[in-house]
Amino acid sequence: MVIASYFYSHPCIISLPVIPEIHNEVKAAATEVSATEAIIHIVLDKQRNNLILFDLKANLATLAITSGTFLTSIFGMNLMSSLETIPGAFYLACGTAGAVTFAIYRSLMKLLATIRPGRVNSIAEMNRLLKR
C-alpha cells in the first residue's frame, strides 16, 4: 500500500506497466550490440589472418630468394673451376638461380594453398556463412 501510494503521488516516477516494455527494449538493444560486436570481432580476425598470411608469403619469398642467392654466391667464390673460362657461364648461373628461385617460390605457394583448405575469400561469403 505504501509503495502504490508513492508511485501514484509522484508524477516523475515511471508507472509500473511501462517497466516490462523498457526492460524488453533494453534487452533487444543489448542483443543487437552483442551481435554487432561479434561481427566486428569476426572482421578483425579476418584482417589479422590476412596480415599473418601476407607475412608468411613474404617470408616464403625471402626463403626462395635466399636459395637463389646461395647458388650465385657459390659461383662468385674465388674457387678454381673451369666455369670462369666459359663466356656464357655468368648468364647461365644467373638464369639457373632465377629459375631455382621461381621454382622454390611456386612450390612453397602450392604447399601453402594445400595447407589452407576451406578459407573464406570474401566478406559476402562470410556473411552467408554467418546467416546459417
Image: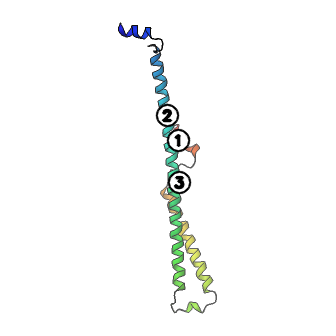
Secondary structure of the residue carrying numbered label 3: helix
Q: How was this image coloured?
A: rainbow
Check if mark 1's residue and mark 3's residue have beta carbons within 8 Å: no
- Which numbered marker is on residue 50? 3
Q: Position of residue 39 (x, y in %)?
A: 51, 40
Specify few, some or many for label 2: CA neighbours under 10 Å numbering under 14, 14-19, or 20 or more: few
Q: Quadrant of the N terminus?
A: top left
Q: Which residue is mark 1?
A: 129
Pointer 1 or 3: first along the chain = 3
Circle 2 is placed at which residue position? 33
Q: What is the count of numbered marks? A: 3
Whole-angstrom CA distance, mark 2 to mark 1, is 20 Å
What amino acid is at disc 1? Answer: Leu
Q: Amino acid at mark 3?
A: Asn
Q: In percent of the image, x 55 and y 80: which residue is there?
A: 72
Residues packed near mark 1 inside 10 Å, few (<14), some (14 to 19) or many (20 plus) = few
Image vertical order of residue 58 relative to residue 117, above or below: below
Say which residue appears at 58% left-offset and 82% top-offset. 93
Residue sitting nearer the eye, 16 or 75: 16
Query: Upstream in the sequence, badge 3 or badge 2?
Result: 2
Q: Does label 2 or label 1 sit earlier along the sequence?
A: 2
Q: Nearer the viewer, residue 114 or 47?
A: 47
Q: Residue furthest left?
A: 1
Percent x, y for residue 31?
47, 31
Compared with 108, 19 (above or below) is: above
Q: Secondary structure at mark 2?
A: helix
The amino acid type of the residue labelled 2 equals: Val
Foreground label between 2 and 1: 2
Residue 77, placed above or below residue 49: below
27 relative to 84 in the view: left or right:
left
- Number of other residues with Cα within 10 Å of mark 3, as a class: few under 14, some 14 to 19, many 20 or more: few
